[in-house]
Image: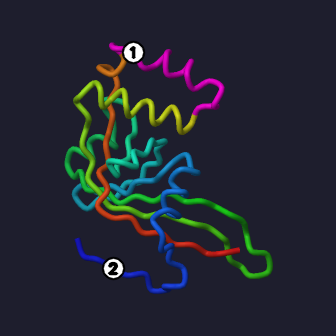
Amino acid sequence: MQKYHLRRSDKKIKKIEDIIAIINRQEYLTLALCNNNHPYLVSLNYGYDLENKCFYFHSATEGKKLEFLKQNPSIYGQILEQLKYKEGECSYAYRSVQFGGEVTFVKDNEEKKHALELMIEKIETPALILNTKNKFITDKIPERVLIGKITVNEFTGKEERL
């Protein structure tokens, strides 16, 4: 894939720690998919595995998203953190993380459980995390759940400051 540079270097988020902080604060990402020159966007809840530099998401076992990913597992994604409208400037303050990667589907049940734990920890109310894990992560559940894994090739970040 051709590498591009950010035209406005003053907007670049330079530290990986800042990029990871945005990933940790937000609840969904948007993936750009393409199949036979037909683009498709899909927004997903996710869990992020810092150690393995990958995102996990859950999915139904059929549908448009899966058809696109089966034909072309290469994706480009974005996580957007909206800050606020800059009154009188006709501009909006934000932070965003962009990433390219490849999607595979997890077969190993232990990895599926790990992915589900990451997703539950990300979106569930802290007081309910343990109950939710016990309810949804059993020895049988992972076999019925389709888990996608996005292995990230590169992160970039951009921001419009307040």
The three-letter code of the residue at mark 1 reads Thr
- For residue 55, above or below residue 141: below
Pointer 1 and pointer 2: residues touching (CB < 8 Å)? no
Q: Quadrant of the C terminus?
A: bottom right
Instruction: Identify which residue, 61 or 149, lies in the foreground.
Output: 149
The three-letter code of the residue at mark 2 reads Tyr
Please give the range of residues in magenta. 124-140
- For residue 129, above or below residue 115: above
Q: Which mark is residue 161?
A: none
Instruction: Identify which residue, 40 or 87, lies in the foreground.
Output: 87
Picture residue at 64% right of the left edge, 61% below the top = 82
The picture quadrant where one finds residue 70 is top left
* Number of residues whose C-alpha sits closer than 10 Å to that of mark 1, classed few (under 14), some (14–19) or many (20 or more): few
Query: Does the magenta segment cover residue 126?
Result: yes
Q: Secondary structure at mark 2?
A: loop
Query: Does the magenta segment cover residue 64?
Result: no
Q: Quadrant of the N terminus?
A: bottom left
Picture residue at 24% right of the left edge, 43% below the top = 104
Residue topped by disc 2: 4
Percent position of residue 35, x then y: 25, 54
Residue topped by disc 1: 138
